[in-house]
Image (cartoon, helix red, strand yellow):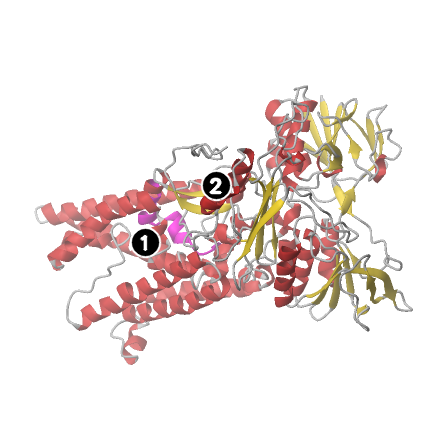
Amino acid sequence: MQAGLMDTYQRPLQKRGAVAWIFCAALVAFYLLIYYTDAFEGPARRLGLGDKWTLYGVLYTLAMVAGGIYFLRRHGNSRYQRIRTITVVAVQVVLAFALPIVMKVLGRQEYYFSYFWPLKIEYFYPSVILQQPFLIVIYSFLGSLVAFPLVGYFLGKRFYCSWICGCGGLANTAGDPFRHLSDKSAGAWRFEKASIYTVLGIAVITTVIVGLNWAVGRQHAAFSSFAFGVQRWYGLVVGGFFSGVLGVGLYPLMGTRVWCRFACPMAAVLGLVQKFGRFRITVKKDMCIACGNCSTYCEMGIDVRAYAMANEHVKRAACVGCGMCAHVCPRGVLKLEVKPDRFKGGTPIRVYAVDL
Amino acid sequence: MHHVIVGNGVCGMEAALALRRKDGEARITLVSDEHDHFYSRTALMYVFAGQMRLQDTEPYDRGLYERLRFERVRERVAELAAQGKSLRFEGGRTIGYDRLLLAVGSRARPAPWPGAAGPGLHYFVTLRDLEGLDHEAKAGRRAVVVGGGLIGVEVAEILLARGLEVTFVVRENWYFPLALDEREALMVAEHLRAHGVDVRLGVNVEEVRRGPDGALAGVRLGDAPRTQAALAAGAAEVPCDLLVCAIGVVPNTGFLATSGLRLAKGGAIEVDDALRAAPDVWAAGDCANVTWADGSRRPEQLWYTARDQGRVAAASMLGDGATYRRGTWYNSAKFFDLEYTTAGWVPVRLDWDNTPLDPGPDVSDWFQRSPGRFDSQRIICSGGMNPPSLIKQGGLSGPPRPPLAADRVIGFNMLGGRWNHEVLLDWIDSRRSLGFVLDRLAEAQFDEELSPRWRRQPGSPPT
């Protein structure tokens, strides 16, 4: 049994009981208020935090730190989980919280060094680019277009989704009690494939339209107002409603990675890279006892057990490499690995000098 | 063609899938009285603990039976009439078949102690057992778990997790002597005790005590034969509210007494190499008496051999020339937090009645334990003989192999970490020397990334 995971289905909060629905409603209400109203501006100022977004940053970071401690108490017996969790929380505290605040205090345009296009879509908007120092623009472009696909190819998308990204960070810390609630059905997988690439397409098209508008918008008033509409719509619907209201709000009912799995354009890009890259979950041959712990605790809804039973290595675009399937496996069948895929699964080829 | 499969466990389900794969038209009926869906019996402990729901232990989606046109009969078979090719259910109905597969598995070995039968006595093999135990296992109660095997340690773990006081009674001088040597087993016992289990080694249950109303009161323990540690005065009476008997399983073949099928002494169904028990009757999984690599005839009570046997039986039922042969042994388990991997031939050092067993002068052990940690590796070496389990598939009737050199590795027993049995088996099958294996052992490590690399401890035995 896995320390920390027993009793999962004996707690109403973790099995979609009434208290889970109430918690979900509270989270959704909170996100609706903070994204679409000024209700939190007053409290933020009274706390000396400037605006509601700083208050949100404080709450988010606190949730991740507290959740990180909670996670380490449950799964800290794994060195991989220990290092990963400390890293993702540290990235949040330093790059996504402290540094932007320092920049703001210094009177500079704040910048989130752990976020990149297409997740942070505005970092490719010309108006935003022009406000940034040259080095940050280089950092942003190199990150999105060169470094991320390259590192994703060699290490898998987990390097971002489970080690750096704040969305994944919250999911794997404060969200950990809800990871088993992800939908494992084939229908959910079909929906995921359709929805995530649709959002990626919309993100690319939005970026192009906003860029075009910057270039030629002055001459074409109708296009300009359309472009502003698209930009605003993307911010409200994808940036706000999908990632915040649904992404976090649905934790208690649909698990922690709703946004990452069904909508995140960054996850879509990195997933494609990963599919053809070197990262995989290696399956030990004919050792699986089909218990189902791996599939149950996969926050991306991947039926890991089906691969393990079939002796197939898991190579899925969706996998964020959190490592929990390997961690909870009672027979040590799974291992996250970076391996060139030269050999077929289950046929290790090793050549030694003969010593018979 | 109507294929009837009795048993909806891994063996029966794998057979049904294999039949359907090769024959899209055949009528396939699965008979089981346990559950409507194939679930993973190995995961019962997680369902009890609340780590998973029963549905999470079902490897296939619930639409599978309709999609693949598997008919289901939720009944218990009362009698097989092999002559008339029909089964009679306990409900009275009969069903005919063209070809029958008995994949009826095991049931718990009944508690043999005086006074055992009655309320408070539990087993942990079926869903019914789970429901009974789940109902009675309340925090604060006292439980005695008897049996030094895998189910015993699982039950001890889940009862402890639920807040019961657990006394774990093992007849042998050390835990699980079928797989572990004394050093390894004492490490496991130490680990269990650190979790709060009261581990009693080398003791037998003499009698189950019951109150005047029949309610369970406790057990009286006595010294096991040739025990190492004599019971301390006053330690013989252990009061308890629950008694879990986990002393093994027996083939679930009671209903076959009048069938005319040949049953082995323990009740397993005698089958040939094609897993055929009689004309148009096959048997596979826990309930089949098969030939082991060492030539002995026993049932194989393992998850993956049940799966493999199901597939072979299906091929055989369809007329393919499939035969079942067991390859080199491997297995894995988990004792609380300690993971365990074994591969190849690991000699048993202690018999059920605590008689020491000598593997012979040619067998030697290389053993190291990480200081202060529950982590050990044991590599078994041999010379001058070919251990029977090393004779590979098809080799039973083949020419005898030449004797091994003295330092060839024939088995591994790894406790604490994760190891890739494929690599270990590869080394065994290619007759590697101990020095060769120790130089490369880290290659077989399967621990999570970022785990420390395996190395020899200073002062570990020379090669």
User: Does residue A92 appear left or right of residue B63 in this picture?
Assistant: left
Q: Main secondary structure of the magenta part?
A: helix
Answer whether residue A255 is magenta in the image.
Answer: yes
User: Does residue B163 appear left or right of residue B298 in this picture?
Assistant: left
Residue type at tag 2: Phe
Q: Chain of mark 1?
A: A
User: Does residue B301 appear left or right of residue B279 in this picture?
Assistant: left
Under circle 2, the secondary element is: helix
Give the label on residue B250, or none: none
Give the label on residue A237, or none: 1
> Which stretch did the figure color magenta?
A254-272
Residue type at tag 1: Val
Above or below B47: residue A279: above
Residue behind mark 2: B436
Above or below A325: residue B284: above
Residue at x-position 75% and y-position 26%:
B272
